[in-house]
Image (spheres, grey):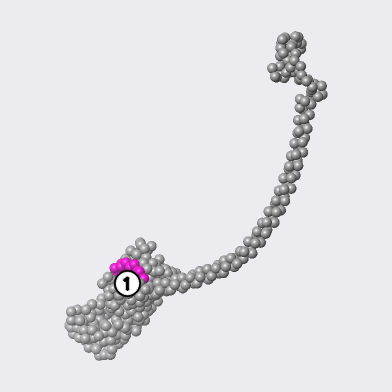
Amino acid sequence: MDALSLYDLNALVRHHIECGMPDEYWVQAELSDVRTNSTGHCYLEFIQKDPHSNSLVAKARGIIWSNIFHLLKPYFEESTGQAFVSGIKVLVQVTVTFHELYGYSLTVQDIDPTYTLGDIARRRKEILDQLASEGVLTLNKELEIPQLPQRIAIISSPTAAGYGDFCHQLQHNPRGFFFHTELFPALMQGDRVEESILSALDQILVRQDDFDVVVIIRGGGATSDLSSFDTYLLAASCAQFPLPVITGIGHERDDTVLDSVAHTRVKTPTAAAEFLISCLDMTADRLEILAGRLRESILSRLAEEHRRLDGCRKRIPSAVVRRLSEAKLTLLTVRKDIFQSVTASLSRQHHRLELLQQRLTDASPEKMLARGYSLTLKDGKVVKDASSLREGDEILTRFFCGKTTSVITNSEL
């Protein structure tokens, strides 16, 4: 029996594959283990997972030669806003090759970004649907931005140009509004964006009473890094954050999931600053309108009171004459009443005095003496008891007409 060497067998396989599959094929797959070498070639794996169990059902080694990769990668990332990294789904045009030493592989010739865009959109929709089903999707949008959002917590890279633009715009606003800003540094590109922003949010949450709003700004940077803002954890944290979240992460084409759940989404860090300035502008305008209305109201009220006082001033003379006439009539009436009251009182008192005088007259000693009584005095004092007299005492007896002096010779009780 003739036997083939392994090389001969692999060469036969290669011949049949090249003859049987000479065309280019569009293949849907997920990228895995993407890496480049020093020469610019990109080596990767294409995989397919079972949608139910998530277990691998197919895998193939792939390669993108440097002359194609240096064109394909920026084109894909610019079109999708997604980095060309492991974990994304792609639609690629490949040729099937087999090498006696390296085995079966797929050589990438082209890529269709619209397929990945569809997958990104689907993934974003799944996250948004999950947040909606949990009842948290619009929580941050339902918060009210304070009328004077001047205390601002900023999540940004401290070296980002967008951060400097944001602060400059606030500090040099036309009306000179004051803003207090505090930076909570975070990575805004790379693999640690989610972790870094979540950490900054936790720090702000501890001090939430110190701030009015949270601003997440990025400004510039690779479009391919936008996928870092499409994670469930980051979106859920911002959606449920107790302070309004404003995003300005420097892109215009599509909203990220973070933009969709934030209270307000603007295009750039500068636009975020302009939005905050406009909030103060509107409040200042309202205050000016209210101040104008208050001034007009005060002037109107003063004019009304002036007219009322003028009317009162004009009515004072006639009112005084009328009041004096009324008072004079009242005084006359009161004087008459007093006179009558005093006259009646004097009459009553005069009659009472006459009665008292009659009683005094009837009770006087002269009246008693006139009736035949006498009054005995000893040493000028009335004698009421015979026992108080002694033999030899001299007494004076007074009659109605005249008096006599006597000496006691005998005293009987």
Highlighted range, magenta = 177-189
Name the residue located 57 percent from the left edge and 68 percent from the top edge. Answer: 310
Instruction: State the image coordinates of residue 411 (x, y, percent, origin top left).
Output: 75, 10
Q: Amino acid at mark 1?
A: Gln
| Visible residue check, residue 191 | no
Name the residue located 29 percent from the left edge and 77 percent from the top edge. Answer: 220
Closer to the camera in the image, 396 or 333: 396
Q: Residue furthest front?
A: 402
User: Which residue position holds label 1?
Assistant: 171
Name the residue located 74 percent from the left edge and 48 percent from the top edge. Answer: 340
Closer to the camera in the image, 28 or 170: 170
| Visible residue check, residue 405 | yes
Rendered position, 152 above or below 365: below
Name the residue located 26 percent from the left edge and 87 percent from the top edge. Answer: 109
Instruction: State the image coordinates of residue 344 (x, y, percent, origin top left).
Output: 75, 44
Q: Is residue 146 magenta?
A: no
Label 1 residue SS: helix
Instruction: State the image coordinates of residue 133 (x, y, percent, origin top left).
Output: 44, 71
